[in-house]
């Protein structure tokens, strides 16, 4: 870490390269597009390199890198939502849309991220809360709500037969 923070590119590549596959898989899950995930993964590594001197070690390096990846995925999703569709628009469709945060698909992505952090990636509640940028209590509450929504969406019976 000290060598990377001192500007040693090789040390940074070794440090970050160990996590590159996991970061890419996260981005692929969040973005759903391989090419976009590759582009965003490059941006994540660039931002990590530019910010490595500000890494203070209050969390693991991977937790810090993961947070950068989540932020960059959110940025890409926001850009995607603002991208024009390229179709004819009727006058009544010119009304201003609601906040991107109100979009049901965006809310589902955020819920999925909570479940991914805790149940798929295996982060501790503390690490997952740091990545999500909320307190542990808030994370636990939101994770519980996300799990309830998943159960409602796929049906409790599926979870029972799967041993969940």
Image: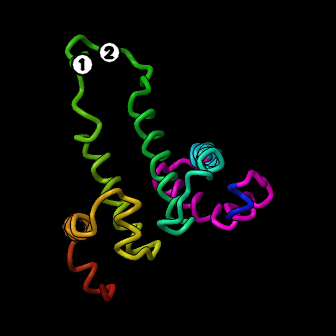
At x 54% / y 47%, what residue is drawn?
33
Give the image location of residue 36, x and y in percent.
57, 43
Question: Magenta span has 15?
Answer: yes
Residue under label 1, please give it. Answer: 93
- Report, in whole angstroms, how far the alpha carbon at label 1 lies from the one at label 2: 6 Å
Residue under label 2, please give it. Answer: 89
The vertical placement of 137 against 9, above or below, is below
Q: Is residue 17 visible?
A: yes
Magenta region, residue range = 6-34
Give the image location of residue 12, x and y in percent.
72, 58
At x 39% / y 75%, what residue is drawn?
119
Q: How many marks?
A: 2
Q: Which residue is at the front of the view, 59 or 109? A: 59
Q: Is residue 20 left or right of residue 131?
A: right
Question: In the picture, residue 114 is in which quadrant?
Answer: bottom left
Label 1 packing within 10 angstroms: few (<14), some (14-19), many (20+): few
The secondary element bearing badge 2 is classed as loop
Prevailing secondary structure of the magenta residues: helix
Q: Is residue 154 visible?
A: no
The secondary element bearing badge 1 is classed as helix
Question: In the picture, residue 35 is in which quadrant?
Answer: top right
Give the image location of residue 46, x and y in percent.
65, 45
**Disc 1 vs disc 2: Cβ atoms closer than 8 Å?**
yes
Q: Is residue 116 left or right of residue 111?
A: right
Coloration mode: rainbow
The vertical placement of 128 against 65, above or below, is below
At x 45% / y 47%, what residue is drawn?
71
Q: Is residue 127 left or right of residue 138?
A: right
Tell me the quadrant of the picture where the N terminus can be found: bottom right
Label 2 packing within 10 angstroms: few (<14), some (14-19), many (20+): few
At x 52% / y 54%, what residue is drawn?
27
């Amino acid at each position: 870490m000290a060598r990377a923070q001192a500007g040693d590119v090789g040390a940074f590549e070794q440090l970050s390269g160990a996590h590159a596959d996991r970061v890419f898989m996260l981005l692929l899950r969040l973005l759903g597009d391989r090419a976009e995930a590759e582009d965003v993964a490059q941006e994540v590594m660039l931002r990590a390199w530019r910010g490595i001197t500000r890494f203070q070690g209050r969390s693991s390096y991977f937790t810090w890198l993961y947070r950068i990846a989540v932020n960059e995925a959110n940025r890409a999703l926001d850009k995607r939502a603002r991208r024009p569709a390229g179709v004819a628009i009727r006058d009544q469709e010119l009304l201003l849309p609601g906040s991107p945060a109100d979009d049901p698909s965006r809310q589902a992505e955020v819920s999925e991220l909570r479940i991914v952090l805790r149940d798929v990636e295996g982060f501790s509640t503390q690490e997952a809360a740091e990545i999500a940028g909320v307190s542990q209590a808030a994370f636990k509450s939101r994770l519980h709500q996300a799990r309830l929504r998943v159960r409602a969406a796929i049906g409790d019976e599926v979870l029972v037969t799967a041993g969940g």
